Amino acid sequence: MNGIGILKGLSVTFKHFIETYVDDIRYGGRKYLGTENFEVRQGTQAKGAFTVQYPEEKIAVPERFRFVPFLVVNDPDHPDAPGKDWCTSCGICAKVCPPQCIWIVRSEDPVTNRPVPEPEAFFIDIDICMNCGYCAEFCPFDAIKMDHDYELADYDRTGVGEHIHDKPKLSKPYEYWYNLAPTTAAEEAADRGGWEHTDVIKSKKKSGEPLMEKPWFMMRTEDPEARARAEAERAARAAAAAESTVSAADIAAERHARRVEALTRHRNWLSKKN
Ligand code: SF4
Ligand code: SF4
């Protein structure tokens, strides 16, 4: 019969309309208060129609939501290397970025002028970034991640740190990344074989040093003694380094000798091959 479809559609709308009020009564008005109720309202158990009162309320984003990238650095009170960049300035992210909106300047050793695996400067033009997440996918060191912060509107896009994010603006501690995406962070740590940077894990495994059982910020919160121990160890290492008689020039000379040795080996191998 003509009009049955329209009536069916209207009945669904009417059901939603009624359910909105029934749900309000069920929650006794608490539906609009507190994080827990807000989550229920946005989840699969929600009934009826609702309006998100943005910007006071915001739709919760899923863990894999991605907006602009940021750089992971060690927590500021990390016992071994506070605030150290995870980025090694390998440049892979800049190469794979489709709109080419990443610029990296690699650090150099002031004594030897040789490249150091950390960025001196790092810029991302977030107005050009298309939020594809390729940089985060391809980074071999889990050093660049996609943020959930989407409120980036501004009156001036030109200044460094405004819409051209520089290294200080991009750098966020590991704790921030973990809280943003705990499942992904745990999966990545399992793949790396530990909670620290890939290079740190490799060198600790080589030297037999124990790996961190949890991310540093958890150890610090759960076990204040672990923090005191780590700080004492760090102080002891710093004192030992200060007492060391090996100067930066000695280290540079040793590196140079090793490089010459490697080059000689390579040339010998080439001459034998030819
Ligand atoms: S791919 Fe990762 S480690 Fe390499 S430059 Fe980009 S952020 Fe740094
Ligand atoms: S998210 Fe995509 S467009 Fe944005 S910086 Fe990363 S690779 Fe480039």
Image: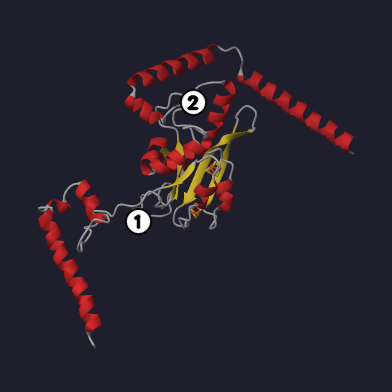
Residue situated in front as seen by the camera: 9 or 242 = 9
| The C terminus sits in image quarter | top right
Q: Secondary structure at mark 2?
A: loop
Ligand 1: image quarter: top right
Which numbered dot is residue 214?
none
Q: Residue at x 20, y 80 (%)?
A: 7
Q: Position of residue 70 (x, y in %)?
A: 44, 45
Amino acid type shown at disc 2: Leu
Q: Position of residue 238 (x, y in %)?
A: 49, 17
Q: Looking at the image, is 257 positioned above or below residue 45? A: above
Q: Residue at x 41, y 55 (%)?
A: 157
Which of the 4 image quarters holds residue 4? Answer: bottom left
Residue situated in front as seen by the camera: 205 or 239 = 205
Q: Looking at the image, is 24 positioned above or below residue 258? A: below
Mark 1: few/some/many CA within 10 Å (<14, 14-19, 20+): few
The answer to whether residue 194 shows anywhere in this view is yes
| The N terminus sits in image quarter | bottom left
- Extreme bottom residue here? 2
| Measured Cα–Cα span from mark 1 to mark 2 | 46 Å
Q: Which residue is mark 2?
A: 211
Q: Position of residue 124 (x, y in %)?
A: 48, 49
Which of the 4 image quarters holds residue 154? Answer: bottom left
Q: Residue at x 45, y 36 (%)?
A: 73
User: Are the two marked residues, 1 and 2, in contact with CB atoms closer than 8 angstroms?
Assistant: no
Residue situated in front as seen by the camera: 209 or 197 = 209
Q: Which residue is mark 1?
A: 155
The answer to whether residue 56 shows anywhere in this view is no
